[in-house]
Amino acid sequence: MSIGEVKATLEEANRLLDQGKTTIEGVGAELDETTGLVLATLHDSRRVEAERARKAITEAVREVKLTLRAIIAAQESGHDFRKALG
């Protein structure tokens, strides 16, 4: 694989990561809205199901944040490598 091909592949990977990031950001926005509704609905419930729902929402929010961080880190690494290639 030539340096030009590596650069092109890195550019394509970055484009795909941008698409993924946009999708995950959309999921995060929807999740934020859903979280507000779920927590308002369950605010005074002590039922086991309510606790499970709160826990699941919290875990989903965490996963969205972790996924966004991973995408950003991958983009930064790809950018640094592309820069090193010249």
Image (cartoon, rainbow, N blue to C red):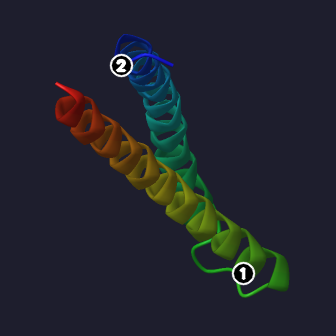
Question: Is label 1 in a helix, a strand or a loop?
Answer: helix
**Callout 2 amino acid:** Ile
Image position of 47 with respect to 61: above or below: below
Q: Quadrant of the C terminus?
A: top left
Q: Based on the displayed image, in which of its 4 quarters is residue 44 positioned?
A: bottom right
Question: In the image, what residue occupies the spot 61% across and 59% down?
Answer: 60
Q: Earlier in the sequence, mark 1 or mark 2?
A: 2
Q: Position of residue 51 (x, y in %)?
A: 72, 81
Q: Position of residue 15 (x, y in %)?
A: 42, 18
**Left-right relation of 48 to 1:** right
Viewer-nearest of discs 1 and 2: 2
Question: In the image, what residue occupies the spot 52% across and 29% down?
Answer: 20
Q: CA distance from mark 1 to mark 2?
A: 53 Å
Label 1 packing within 10 angstroms: few (<14), some (14-19), many (20+): few
Image position of 33 with respect to 37: above or below: above
Give the residue at mark 1.
51
Q: Nearer the viewer, residue 10 or 54?
A: 10
**Label annotation for residue 3:** 2
**Left-right relation of 14 to 46:** left
Q: Nearer the viewer, residue 79 or 50?
A: 79
Q: Nearer the viewer, residue 78 or 45?
A: 78
